Amino acid sequence: MKDDVLKIENQLCFPLYAASKEIIRKYKPFLDKYDLTYTQYIVMLVLWEHDSINVKTLGEKLFLDSGTLTPLLKKLETKKYINKVKLEKDTRNVIVSLTKEGKDLKSKCTNIPLEMGKCINLSKEEAKVLYSLLYKVLKEK
Amino acid sequence: MKDDVLKIENQLCFPLYAASKEIIRKYKPFLDKYDLTYTQYIVMLVLWEHDSINVKTLGEKLFLDSGTLTPLLKKLETKKYINKVKLEKDTRNVIVSLTKEGKDLKSKCTNIPLEMGKCINLSKEEAKVLYSLLYKVLKEK
DNA sequence: TAAAAATAAATTGTATACAATTTATCTAGG
DNA sequence: CCTAGATAAATTGTATACAATTTATTTTTA
């Protein structure tokens, strides 16, 4: 009777995994314009809010570790969107901040959430419910 | 006024992306026992249902392409969980099937969905709502 | 205050992901 | 029947992810 617990359509994680990838794939045409990947884009989102932040805090906000962020930040530096400097008071900390180009990019990206909204087949209410359920999943840790 | 559309907490995609990764990370201790990654596990889920399937169909079910599946299937073959043979009628098709070990693994994994259920901080009803919203996102394509 | 513990990034190693291309094979139309 | 187009995997190249370790620095404590 419990044979179907392993059916893929009975897993909650699978549609989560698949939907996440599918939506990220839909970002691509919008982000390609600015030579950004999705992960680079969410780093920029955080920087547009904070302007300057250390790698650890950035990682906590995005659920990413230095193994992912170190090379990614190097790429954003090469693209001239960010700068990296060591904190004088404690040189273990690397502070990431926006260049002028990085700041200027923000206004060009304001249409992306709207465009993406059109790509997602959910009503405003459904999106809200989905949003809070996902945060409930995330908050438990 | 529309300045906050780019705030990370106003994005729907971000919690989707983060929750997906967090849940997959929670699978790790359960899957490590059988030397499986999450992606290898979902391939096994499909094979436990179908026993034999070609790479293309497998990819369609899992939203994965041959670039991901080819090396992954090689690893599952090395672990002796699957076999790969070319379809005689049309040798472009590679048919993946379970070995005895691969079949036997199924019964050992039946506890995983239950254990994972305990790790996710949602009621049965919430999980159901989340599930259908995610499939709604996926179905639109 | 000097060694031990803690902390933050960076590095290393393994495993995805996926776009784009290539290779091998098959199918259909002339 | 024979070639142009279609199809399925495999390959190539780039970019994450993340566990585990290492390096450099700072803080704690005996």
Image (spheres, coloured by chain):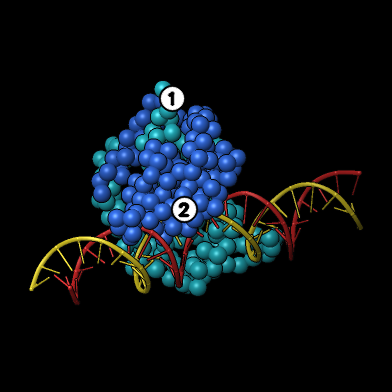
Chain colours: A cyan, B blue, C yellow, D red
Identify the residue at image location x=38%, y=56%. B86
Q: Is residue B73 above or below residue A12?
A: below
**Chain holding disc 2:** B
Q: Is residue C14 left or right of residue B44?
A: right
Q: Quadrant of residue A89?
A: bottom right
- Percent from the top left, x then y, of residue C8? 65, 56
Task: Name the residue carrying label 2.
Answer: B73
Mark 1 belongs to chain = A
**Which of these two is toward me, A131 or A90?**
A131
Q: Is residue A18 above or below residue D7?
A: above
- The crowding category of the residue bearing disc 2, from other C-alpha atoms within 10 Å (few below 14, some 14 to 19, many at least 20), is many
Q: Amino acid at mark 2?
A: Leu
2 and 1 marks on the same chain? no
- B93 left or right, relative to A90: left
Q: Quadrant of residue D6?
A: bottom left
Residue A39 vertical placement versus A8 (above, below): below
